[in-house]
Image (cartoon, rainbow, N blue to C red):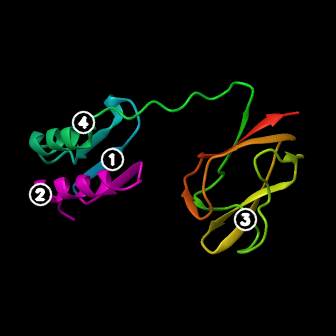
Amino acid sequence: MQLDHDQLRSLLALLAESDIQELCLEGDDFRLEVRRNLPASASVAMVQAPLQVAPTAPAAAAASAAAPSVPPPAPPAVRSDLQAITAPMVGTFYRSPAPGEPAFVEIGSRISAGQPVCILEAMKLMNELEAEISGEVVEILLENGTPVEFGQVLMRIKPG
């Protein structure tokens, strides 16, 4: 697989418009890794095979194309007394067991450890996510049917 300067620029433009946070692409004579929302030194790395001379223009263009022109907004402050329920996998977030049925939990609901709080669909499999702690649901951060990434915060719980 060959990757020229124009293809690299197009690929980076597509990635900038998507929600993809990390991409690794390998060919016979190159390896391209792009990561977003990481320290600037780790945003783009392009490694050429030892037998070839690495062109500097594509790597420089990749670094400038991948660097955001405006810094991302600061995340809202999170209360230190809250515990996060995070996604253990990539999938689609659902608040209820089936369409038309009531949600597992609402803001203000009291939950106990082991109680289902949502469903994460991955590859057409519905996986109930159970609370690991007991407490009160303070925040539900996603809408029904929203795609989620591994480790993304789904809800916040006030233990107790």
Dot 4, how many residues are within 10 Å of its Cα: few (below 14), some (14-19), or many (20+)? few
Residue in the foreground of this view, choosing between 97 and 1: 97
Whichever of callouts 2 and 3 sits on the residue coming sooner in the sequence is 2
Pointer 2 residue: 6
> What segment is highlighted magenta in the picture?
1-28
Whichever of callouts 1 and 2 sits on the residue coming sooner in the sequence is 2
Pointer 4 residue: 69
Q: CA distance from mark 1 to mark 2?
A: 17 Å
Tag 2–tag 3 contact (CB < 8 Å): no
Q: CA distance from mark 1 to mark 3?
A: 31 Å
Q: Tell me, yes or no, whether the highlighted magenta stretch contains residue 4.
A: yes
Whichever of callouts 1 and 3 sits on the residue coming sooner in the sequence is 1
Residue 47 image offset from top left, x and y in percent: 25, 44
Q: CA distance from mark 2 to mark 4?
A: 20 Å
Residue in the foreground of this view, choosing between 60 and 127: 127
Pointer 1 residue: 33
Whichever of callouts 4 and 1 sits on the residue coming sooner in the sequence is 1
Residue in the foreground of this view, choosing between 66 and 76: 76
Dot 3: element: strand
Amino acid type of the residue that numbered disc 2 sits on in the rendered structure: Asp
Amino acid type of the residue that numbered disc 3 sits on in the rendered structure: Asn
Q: Which of label 2 and label 4 is nearer to you?
A: 4
Amino acid type of the residue that numbered disc 1 sits on in the rendered structure: Glu
Q: Which of label 1 and label 3 is nearer to you?
A: 3
Amino acid type of the residue that numbered disc 4 sits on in the rendered structure: Ser
Tag 4–tag 3 contact (CB < 8 Å): no
Residue 94 shows which numbered tag?
Answer: none
Pointer 3 residue: 127
Q: Which of label 4 and label 3 is nearer to you?
A: 4
Q: CA distance from mark 2 to mark 3?
A: 41 Å
